[in-house]
Image: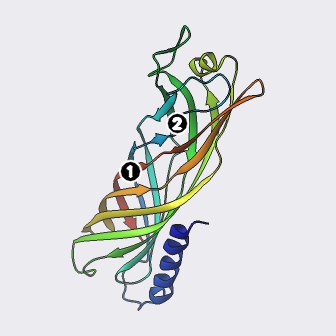
Amino acid sequence: MSTSIKAATGGALLALSVCVAHADDGVPDNTVRVGMYYIQYHSSADDISGPYVPTGLNLSVNDVETLYLAYVRRLSVHFDLELAAGYPPLTKTEGRGPATLGSVPYNGQVISTARWFAPTLLLNYKFFDDSHAWRPYVGVGVNYANFYDRRSTAAGDAASGAPTSISLPVSVGVAGTVGMAYHLQGRWSLFLSYSATVVKSKLTTDTAGVERTTEISFGPRALVFAAGYSF
């Protein structure tokens, strides 16, 4: 585990130990949120390396939208613990570099797809107290990203020279968020947040025993609009 992940986890646990016991003030302790994730990938990758790979061969990741779901546990007046996840989106990767590989189109072609299961655990600090309708907050935590249903497309197989399998190991990284909560009335609230997460992995393709690799940083940035119900 990297130093930054250890620091974020340690800080979250320390804050949790301080604020986990709070007075029974009649405010609901549990909230479920439903909304939309708008995810932009600020991806960067090393040029793909391996046998028969020309120089300058790279890739990028397309933005996606998906359903946002979260459970939030109120720890105290100012602290919440949030477990956020989304319906695993189908993420598409495009080739970047030469227009063609031989006679095969490459640049701008969708060469692979994968789905993500990527829950994030956040410790949020809320400004003001429960008497305020508007409550900005900041949070820090850890993201776990598991890539599955990984597939090379027909364009990817053609670029690789034959049917190709893809390996993309699990990523664990630091996550941070800033947001705003607005209490409507009763048990209902609205939420707007923006988060950044460190997601890195080593992509390996296997084409009839020929392996090519690249280190990729996905750099997801997520804008969330959601409604919450407390109980």
In what element is the residue under mark 1?
A: strand
The N terminus, quarter of image = bottom right
Q: Classify 83 as above or below 166.
A: below
Give residue 60's position: percent from left, percent from top. 46, 34
Q: Nearer the viewer, residue 208 or 19?
A: 208
Give residue 159's position: percent from left, percent from top. 59, 18
Q: Residue extending furthest right?
A: 209
Residue at 51% from the left image edge and 87% from the top image edge: 17
The residue where tag 2 is placed is 90
In what element is the residue under mark 2?
A: strand
Q: Classify 141 as above or below 210.
A: below
Q: Classify 223 as above or below 110.
A: below
Q: Which mark is residue 222?
A: 1
Give residue 217's position: percent from left, percent from top. 50, 47
Tag 1: residue type? Ala
* Mark closest to the chain's N terminus, 2 or 1: 2
Q: In the picture provided, is 170 more to the left or to the right than 139?
A: right
Q: In the picture provided, is 111 more to the left or to the right than 123?
A: right
- Where on the picture, by quarter, is residue 66? top left
Q: Are discs 2 and 1 less than 8 Å apart at CB?
A: no
